[in-house]
């Protein structure tokens, strides 16, 4: 079943996963928390729309490992018919941890075709790491400086699976 919501900018009916409006070009929300902010759509209705999305994960051109991760992400984020059911701690780790992203960071994102996010997350996480290093140095905690070097790796590790889900399943390969 296909679900539609009004455009944030002009009110034209769009598919719930549309990243932008073809009529006015306004960016649209694609997650349950953002979808609830559509004008005229009650918060509960946005969640129902996401549950109506037909997830054809079997037809995606990705490996079975990615299909399994995508199913878990959809389940955790409330997308599709099984959305909103709790995950076990092991399943949460599969959703929230990506060791390839930890070790290769922005290069891994580039490999997956997400150059905008590689650039944005790389620059912002490096700025955060340098800021943390400066703060630790100012407080006399030089022994903790190694922790600031882990900031970019930690951010890439946590974001990689969800960002790839957003790109492949929801069709949004934007900056955020």
Image: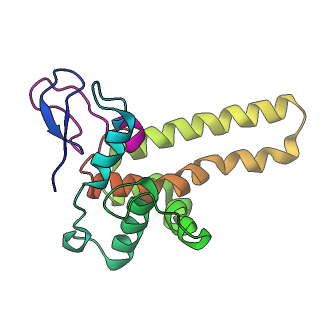
Residue toward you, 9 or 102:
9
Residue toward you, 68 or 176:
68
Across and down, in percent, residue 58 comes to 23, 74
112 over 120 or under it: above or below: below
Kindly report the secondary structure that dominates the magenta region of the rendered protein. loop
Q: Please give left or right for residue 31 compared with residue 16 in the image.
A: right
Q: Quadrant of the C terminus?
A: top left
Q: Is residue 43 magenta?
A: no
Q: How is the image coloured?
A: rainbow
Q: Please give left or right for residue 28 compared with residue 120 in the image.
A: left
Q: Quadrant of the N terminus?
A: bottom left
What residue occupies the far bottom of the structure in this picture?
Answer: 64
Specify the quadrant of the image occupied by residue 8.
top left
Across and down, in percent, residue 71 comes to 37, 67
Inspect this view and state whether residue 107 appears. no
Number of dots carrying numbers: 0
Q: Please give left or right for residue 174 compared with residue 61 in the image.
A: right
Q: Is residue 18 magenta?
A: yes
Residue toward you, 27 or 50:
50
75 over 124 or under it: above or below: below
What residue occupies the far right of the structure in this picture?
Answer: 140
Q: Residue at x 33, y 78 (%)?
A: 64
Inspect this view and state whether residue 171 appears. yes
Q: Residue at x 33, y 72 (%)?
A: 67
Residue toward you, 28 or 88:
88
Specify the quadrant of the image occupied by residue 61.
bottom left
Q: Which residues are magenta?
A: 17-34
Across and down, in percent, residue 136 comes to 81, 35
38 over 93 or under it: above or below: above
């Amino acid at each position: 079943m296909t679900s539609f919501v009004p455009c944030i900018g002009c009110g034209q009916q769009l598919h719930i996963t549309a990243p932008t409006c073809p009529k006015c070009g306004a960016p649209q929300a694609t997650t349950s928390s953002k979808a609830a902010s559509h004008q005229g759509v009650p918060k509960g209705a946005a969640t129902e729309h996401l549950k109506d999305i037909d997830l054809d994960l079997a037809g995606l051109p990705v490996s079975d490992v990615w299909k399994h991760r995508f199913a878990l992400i959809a389940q955790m984020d409330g997308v599709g018919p099984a959305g909103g059911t709790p995950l076990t701690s092991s399943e949460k780790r599969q959703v929230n941890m990506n060791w390839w992203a930890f070790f290769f960071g922005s290069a891994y994102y580039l490999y997956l075709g997400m150059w905008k996010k590689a650039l944005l997350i790389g620059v912002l996480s490096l700025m955060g790491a340098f800021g943390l290093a400066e703060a630790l140095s100012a407080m006399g905690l030089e022994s903790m400086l190694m922790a600031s070097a882990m900031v970019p790796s930690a951010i890439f590790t946590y974001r990689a699976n969800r960002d790839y889900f957003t790109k492949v399943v929801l069709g949004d390969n934007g900056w955020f």
